[in-house]
Amino acid sequence: MGKVAVTYKVMPQGVEIDLLLLEQSVRGMIGAGLKSLEVRPVAFGLKAILATAVMDDAGGGSEVLEGKLSGLTGVESVETVEVTLI
């Protein structure tokens, strides 16, 4: 079994959401598997968090984490934008 790097785009519910607090929540949810985390502007002051996690290439692993990230306070949506075998 190999490893994959999965990049998630986490969209906050709006510009009023504390992005630093949301970043901390994302870091805590991903834990030691976090490879990178960056904030990118989307539009009209809204910013998205792009988080890349390294995990085992097990069936359904990325979907489980996506669901957990979606459940964080202040998150509007989570989208898997890239999956790369490493």
Image (spheres, rainbow, N blue to C red):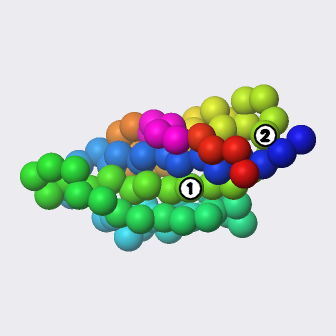
How crowded pointer 1 is (Cα within 10 Å; few <14, some 14-19, many 20+) is rated as many
How many labels sit on residues? 2
* Within-10-Å neighbours for mark 2: few <14, some 14–19, many 20+: some
The residue that mark 1 highlights is 52
The disc placed on residue 37 is: none
Q: Estimate the x, y position of residue 4 in percent, counting from the top left.
A: 71, 46
Task: Say left or right for 19 vs 2.
Answer: left
Q: Tell me which numbered mark, 1 or 2, is placed earlier along the sequence.
A: 1
- Tell whether label 2 touches label 1 (CB within 8 Å): no
Q: Is residue 81 visible?
A: yes
Q: Residues in magenta? A: 78-82
Q: Which SS class for mark 2?
A: loop
- As drawn, is 81 to the left or to the right of 13? right
Q: Residue furthest left?
A: 44
Element type where label 1 sits in the image: strand
Magenta span contains residue 81: yes
Q: Within the magenta stretch, is there residue 72?
A: no
Residue at 42 percent of width and 46 percent of height: 9
Query: Which of the two residues, 82 or 9, is positioned nearer the viewer here?
Result: 82
- Position of the N terminus, as image quadrant, is top right
Please identify the dominant SS of the magenta region: strand
What's the amino acid at mark 2? Asp
Type of the residue with mark 1: Thr
Q: Is residue 59 left or right of residue 15?
A: right
**In this figure, which residue is indicated by the disc labeled 2?**
57
Using the image as rendered, state which of residue 15 and residue 61 is in the foreground.
61
How far is disc 1 from disc 2 in space, using C-alphas?
14 Å
